[in-house]
Image (cartoon, helix red, strand yellow):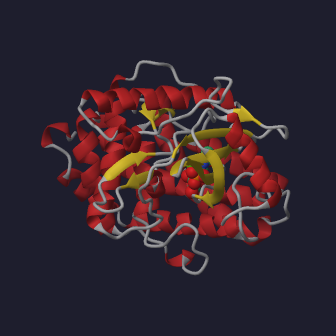
Amino acid sequence: MIFGGKVKKTIRKAFEAFDIRGEFDCAKRCGNGNINNTYHITAREEGVLHNYIFQRINTSVFTEPDKLMHNLVRVVDHHRAALAKSGVEDLDKRVLKVFKTRSGEHFYTDSSGNCWRCHLFIDGKTHESLEDPEKLFNIAYAYGSFISNMEDFQDELHETIPNFHDGKFRLRQLEQAAIENRAGRLSSVQEWVDFVFENSSDLVSLQDKIETGIVPLRITHNDAKINNVILDKETGRPLCVIDLDTVMKGSVLFDFGDMIRSAANTVSEESPEQCCSASLDIKRFECLLEGFMQAGGDVLVSSEIEHINQAVRLLSLMIGTRFLTDYINGDVYFKIRWEDHNFTRALNNLHLYASIKRQSDHIDNLIRKYTPSCRLV
Ligand code: GN1
Ligand code: MG
């Protein structure tokens, strides 16, 4: 979608605040984020086109954009240095290049209080759903490499969203939403609220393991969805991991689980028609497991490997719970495009969760297949 009028004016103003090349040409909405708004902007300079990504940060969700940008810049600098050291040449395609404003900040606040950031556009392809084994492997390889690259990261990162992947917290949020029933929708979704509570041990147990130190924390991506890896348009090789807003302390299991729930589901999270048939495609699971282990397996410790299966259950149930909670609350967190959108997303992930549970033995066998025997407990 190309914009005119007021939106264009606002974006143009944001563009002019940044220390970047070219004269503003046009802005198109892009990406499918549930939180921030993303625009592809082209600018002209003596017949040459420059391409940028502008994002309006959702400050109801990311309440401290300065801390968010602090994290982002540290993380991209670290990745850039690591890639340069290993001889990678096309660095601007392999890691986000973040621009500053003319006054030297990493984000710009406009007159309405909106926060904007800008980075170089990477010409590649992202996917919402894939069956191609090689591309799935590549996406997982990118996330495995991300974890492995962050192993020697020394800086402290801010917690951009507290309790983000804390299953106990997400359960309490659902409980609170059900008590308040603010949008009057509870009775229509009661059976699914009951479903989450019947399965609540899967929301709680990994968090217990984290709290008792059995499962370690490290720096993780925390939004390892299928569409957050840019692949090369021609070759399908992984170029760049994007959407670094929630890179902070977490468990690698969150990333693995998020990757599986978003990339091995037979139905897209956004699909209203087939959400009841959402299920785990074990073939896609295997490609993803192989790619992730190949790139990141060496840095995983036994207690992480031991809980992979649990993590796959946790992340599908947790996001299903988050969508259900938001639906009951009247859609206050995730952007929606139709009335029952959040319920669709919840149903989709809760059906996926049920399917993951049914295939637990199969999942365990595959985890054993791709884990070096010395790491199995
Ligand atoms: C949100 O906006 P997007 O798609 O990058 C959410 C993730 C969810 C995802 C569900 C900050 O991410 O946690 O997994 O939607 N991000 C935030 O598709 O809440
Ligand atoms: Mg995100």
Residue at the spot 44% in from the left edge and 63% down from the top edge: 127
Q: Is 160 drawn above or below residue 139 in the view shown?
A: above
* Residue 314 % position (x, y): 48, 51
Viewed as shown, does residue 40 lie left or right of 331?
left
Q: Is residue 160 visible?
A: yes
| Residue closest to the far front | 46
* Residue 214 % position (x, y): 39, 30
Of 372 and 118, which appears nearest the observer? 118
Viewed as shown, does residue 104 lie left or right of 74?
right
Viewed as shown, does residue 306 lie left or right of 6?
left
| Number of numbered discs visible in the structure rendering | 0
Q: Is 358 drawn above or below residue 123 in the view shown?
A: below
Of 135 and 94, which appears nearest the observer? 94
* Residue 283 % position (x, y): 29, 68
Residue at the spot 31% in from the left edge and 62% down from the top edge: 234
Of 111 and 299, which appears nearest the observer? 111
Question: Which quadrant would residue 137 be assigned to in this image?
Answer: bottom left
**Which quadrant, please, contains the N terminus?**
bottom right
